Image (cartoon, helix red, strand yellow):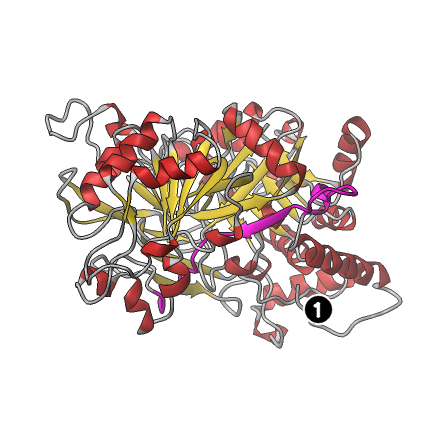
Amino acid sequence: MTPIHAKEKPLVHRAVLLTLLVAVGLQLLTESRPLTNSASAGEEETQFVDLSLLVASDYPCTWPTFPAFQINHYKKIGPRSVYNSDILIMDGNTGTQLDVPTHSVTPADSGFPNAGWAGTVTTDKVLAWQFVGEACVVDCAELLDSTPNGRSGLITQERIKLWEKKNRPLAAGDVVLFRSGFSDKHYKPFPEGRRFAADPVAGKSPGWPGPDPACMEYLASRKVMTLGIDSTSMGPMPDLAEPTHYAGLKHGMIWTEGATGLGALPRTGSFYCMMGPKHVGDPYSEGRAFGIVGGPLAKRLIASARKKNVVDLSVGLADNLPTSWPGHGVGNHRQAYMTIYFGKNPNTRTAFPMHMVDSHAGTHLVPPSYALPRKGFDNRDYAPEAQQWLSEYEKKYGPRGTSDVTTEKVPIAQTCGPARVIDVKHLLGTIAKGKWPASPEITKAEIQNYEKKHGALKAGDIVIFQSGWSDLYYKPLPKGSACMEDPLNGTREGWPAPGPDAIQYLAGKGIRCVATDAPSLGGADPKHALWTYWMLGTNGMVGVEFLTNLSNLPTGGYFMFAAGKIKGCHGGPGRAIALY
């Protein structure tokens, strides 16, 4: 969190400043380990390890023959907007990425040689348990840069069998990670970054290490369903890329490509997770990989993963769903979610999909910089109405903060923790029609009532408001207009949303992440929505919006959310799951 921007009133706003200091202290502590997961005497501390590449236009984050990644900061805090937001144009093969079976396998009735039962498993149909498991790190360092130009060093089944002899037999629930250090060494800004993908593909430098088809078949025989590699691709060059992909994906495997920092994980015993946005019908997805090392938390999560006790809490992203913010009236919408098709995948005989999307589409992250300007911002640059709102806010709550915390600066640990689900469904239908557009306010009293029944909230908890809104209204358009368009235009009551007082109370409890199964934490009224986001950001808190399926999350679950590691992004579609 950055210093607040405005003259401070030490007597009137002492409570606010105390809250800010507490939030800063919590942030510094939690970046090394969540407070709720602290180790007891004699126990190893829990650490979150980010295993993802930075996505940025000056890095080799896109497959070299595909359209390049682009980010357009089209909404900027100033006269025309009180928020920062971005248009993302990206193919699923961007940065640290997730491959699923339809990358190479066609439907069973397609009539093609690569047809099979897994040929309908797209990113939205992968079961959530497959994203997680115990990391089993296979050292392949001697294969790094050991081959002629354009050729890959092969990871064989013999290497796997030797690993098993030294460690333990592999089994269902394990995630096999091939570590050579390729991305650690070669993922750099251009022009050096050409060594990561373009030069090997062009035959100008050695290829990345990768498993051969026989290795994949052996892993399938051990019931391993999830893999990862720190190479550009799982497929070896020059001619085994597709045979290797098909050998694993036909069994229903999924895997991470472009992981990094795998050397920070022990050979066994750490928890691994890789998730990506829930693009409906896609054969791959941009994603975020991370590990949890040490302490009882990793063991508990691994045990849940082996039992497949994992629930998906993310909405699907599709052109015909209310995935993107429609705004009030005409011409105030955000970038609509669009699927763009290009080229043709010779293996599946279909076009490659990519997407143009607003950074707050679907299940997404809200970092502090979404609503907070950078330090030095002149408040007179707001539109007159927003200046008035700010004046009222600061008279009541003290100075609004400033921030440069974009998505890539939010620690993974901040969006993971024990799930504390607060049921607010009883608030639906409590706002008179004459007051629309408006949302029922989730108050401090609502939260305190929850605590009386279920115990006090603790630092590190993830507070989740359950209204059932997305379950009710996240439907294909035009029916789906009831989800956002109608409430914003005053023809339907808005979704329940926390007010700034509730957020201030949560900040004082040490809560650093607040989530909702509604479209936004701000609600349908623009003024009070902005106040809520100012309070979140000023306290160094982040939001996760547009969850779903919370009724299937048992009490005591552990919540996880991750958005792509996109440089300078003011949001970012991601995936939310919970283990129990």
Q: Quadrant of the N terminus?
A: bottom right
Corner quadrant of residue 21: bottom right
Q: Nearer the viewer, residue 132 or 277?
A: 132
Q: Position of residue 457 (x, y in %)?
A: 76, 38
**36 relative position to 471: left or right:** right
In the image, residue 509 sits, relative to residue 173, either above or below, namely below
Tell me what residue is drawn at x 23 percent, y 65 percent.
205
Corner quadrant of residue 322: top left
Q: Secondary structure at mark 1?
A: loop
Q: Quadrant of the C terminus?
A: top right
In the image, residue 87 sits, relative to residue 223, either above or below, namely below
Q: Is residue 520 visible?
A: no
- Residue 44 lies in the magenta stretch: yes
Tell me what residue is drawn at x 30 percent, y 61 percent.
145
Q: Position of residue 566 (x, y in %)?
A: 44, 58
- Residue 9 lies in the magenta stretch: no
Residue type, numbered disc 1: Ile
Q: Which residues are magenta?
A: 34-59
Q: Is residue 23 visible?
A: yes
The residue indicated by pointer 1 is 4
**42 relative position to 341: left or right:** right
Tell me what residue is drawn at x 37 percent, y 50 percent.
140
Predominant SS along the magenta part: loop
Residue sticking out furthest to the right:
11
Q: Position of residue 235 (x, y in %)?
A: 25, 46
Tell me what residue is drawn at x 42 percent, y 61 percent.
184
Q: Position of residue 385 (x, y in %)?
A: 60, 64
Q: Nearer the viewer, residue 468 or 126?
A: 126
Count of marks overlaid on the render: 1
In the image, residue 345 sits, relative to residue 10, either above or below, namely above
**106 relative position to 562: left or right:** left
